[in-house]
Image: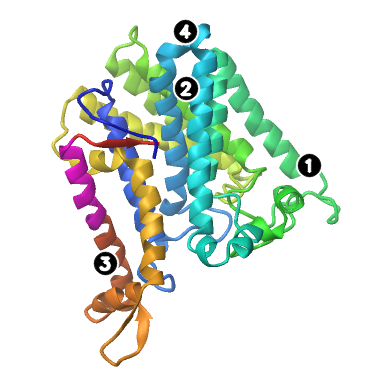
Amino acid sequence: MTSISTATTAPARLLSLDFFRGATVAAMILVNNPGDWGNIYTPLEHAEWNGCTPTDLIFPFFLFIVGVSIAYAMGSKKTNPATHRKTILKALKRALILFGLGLFLSLFPKVFTDPIGAFQHVRIPGVLQRIAVVFFISSIIFLKNSEKNIFRILIALLAVYWALMTFVPVPGVGYANLEKETNLGAWIDRGILTEAHLWKSAKTWDPEGIFSTIPAIATGLSGILVGVYLKRKDVDAASKIAWLFTTGCAAVVLGLLWDLQFPINKSLWTSSFVLYTGGLATVILALSYWIIDVHQYNRFTKPFVVYGVNAITVFFLSGLIPRILGMIHVKNSTGTEITLQAWLYSGFSSYFSPINASLAWAVTFILFWLIILWAMYNKKIIIKV
């Protein structure tokens, strides 16, 4: 965490964007923190492989929001090339911090008990790491290119990724394919990172791997294009909303059509997945903008806004706390030693069915952070990363 600013000194914010960001982060925490991973409602799980559940929408929505935020935060700096170097260095610093926070979550707590072993087997890719890379590369593309060129780059990334994944034979396999362990992306990740540094649940592939970050950058660029359009002063609000709805729906349709040949797949971050999720994100942001910023119906937004203005902070800490709870051991009523998290969760499992207890734990976790974030918001504390 690099600095703390107050809302009174911060520039004007797009309230609907904070709302959308907060809702996305709250949903991310919900699906990442069930009480029991063996008991989860289907919509709160990722698709097994091809397909898209509500949970699969969360991460691309966040990367889309990152892109919109870049357009708003760096828009004034883009017009002055003399400031580009300073802006890029600042973006690099922020990206390195985000990447470092992600690595810390992968290392914790083993780094304190077995440092050598922790680094030998640390998972290098991850959610914060991907956010860092997408943020940095998207920032450079935004600063150095026109809106038309950004669109061309977006299309090129999707087309090149599709061509490489579906036509290039995979070494050692002999043919192009989209299976978990034998696709080109998995082969590249294993070759560069080695199995020791990939997702522990698979070891042979990673849902946030190197190769699939290429189309993830396209997701960030789609957010940039939407952000640039929302900032235009020569277009009235009604026209903006109509255009965003039309474009978003068109992207969804194109994504579904491309799904017939290049399946929608979150783990591979396929080009069809980029279009489908980017289209939905555009429609949701347009609807939020119409309701919240245009018509000023915003009384319901504060719980989400308090999440949105400290999004990275709460995401990082919500990933850290469960690890700490798992390190602390207490004795239950029978005298058996269990983790503090298991002891706390036993109170939920005593009153609810297994699947509802798991959900109740996740919801309670969200409400716990809401109280903290609400207090921070009222004190105008925004921790910037």
Disc 4 to disc 1, C-alpha distance: 40 Å
Q: In this rendering, would 286 be left or right of 80?
A: left
Kind of residue at badge 3? Ala
Picture coordinates of residue 345 (x, y %)? Answer: 30, 74
Q: Is residue 164 above or below residue 83?
A: below
Of pointers 1 and 2, the one earlier in the residue sequence? 1
Disc 2 to disc 4, C-alpha distance: 16 Å
Q: Nearer the viewer, residue 335 or 197?
A: 335
Q: Nearer the viewer, residue 276 or 81?
A: 81
Say how many tags the image has.
4
Tell me, for residue 225, which label it has, or none. Answer: 2
Kind of residue at badge 4? Thr
Disc 4 secondary structure class: loop
| Mark 2 surroundings within 10 Å by alpha-carbon count, few (fewer than 14), some (14 through 19), many (20 or more) | many
Q: Tell me if residue 255 is in the magenta stretch.
A: no
Q: Which residue is mark 3?
A: 360
- Range of magenta residues: 367-379
Q: Which residue is mark 4?
A: 79
